[in-house]
Image (cartoon, rainbow, N blue to C red):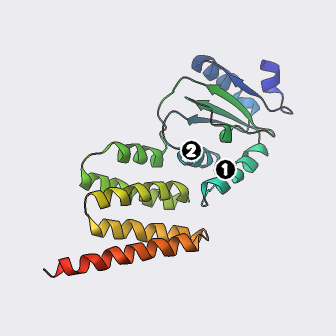
Amino acid sequence: MRARLADNSLPFTASLSRSTTGEFARAFAGDFDAVLHLDCATGTLADMAGDLACQAGLHLPGELTANLERLRVFCEARRFLIVLEGAAPADLIFGGRCSTLISSESGEPSRDALRQLARAFDAVEDWTEACRLARQARRVAHDQFRLAECVEIMTQWRAMAEENDDRPVVEEASRELVWILDGWGRTDEARQLEQTRAMEFDEQLPLLFE
């Protein structure tokens, strides 16, 4: 197994304990272009793909399906050792020159800034703090070209705003979603969301003058 892992001509996938995975990663780090550790125990597939791409120096500004394909092509062309901790999403196990170590045991939660914000946003109960976290996550997502994750957070934020009857935030989140969907070429969905937003705003106008 050690010989196969160190063989630059063969991709390698193995399921090991977390301690053994760590030992292998340290022992063979010099045989790879990079060793990438990924927390797969928390978050969504979009979170994980964005985190992995960020570690690899790749921008993923598209939809999740396109992002996964771009990530696959990028990683398979490089001699990466990817360590998946906590689970093994099939979409993040690559061939080519890329090798993978899998541990079903969870490691440390990802220190990726956007994923930390997403975790905090999911856990927060105070509405004002939730809004602050959502806006901060949006800024980081734009800075790192991780719009699939931004859509997930904005969609969740918009739903929460409706529950809290916060019309300005519904508007804010909706505008962001329309902008991203338009950029992805999903024009019909963007127009439908824009029409819904406009109808909701019109319904609120009489209340503003009572």
Q: Quadrant of the N terminus?
A: top right
Q: Residue 209: where, in percent of width, then height?
A: 16, 82
Residue at (70, 37) in percent of width and height: 93
Q: Residue 66: where, in percent of width, then height?
A: 67, 56
Check disc 2 and report the residue beneath it. Answer: 45
Q: Quadrant of residue 200?
A: bottom left
- Determine the residue located farthest toward the left in the rendered image: 210
- Looking at the picture, does residue 208 appear above or below residue 60? below
Looking at the rendered structure, the kind of residue marked 1 is Leu
- Looking at the picture, does residue 123 appear above or below residue 13? below
- Looking at the picture, does residue 86 appear above or below residue 53? above
Looking at the rendered structure, the kind of residue marked 2 is Leu
The one of 197 and 182 positioned closer to us in this rendering: 197
Q: Residue 40: where, in percent of width, then height?
A: 55, 35
Check disc 1 and report the residue beneath it. Answer: 68
Residue 93 left/right relative to 146: right
Q: Quadrant of residue 201?
A: bottom left
Q: Residue 196: where, in percent of width, then height?
A: 41, 73
Q: Secondary structure at mark 2?
A: helix
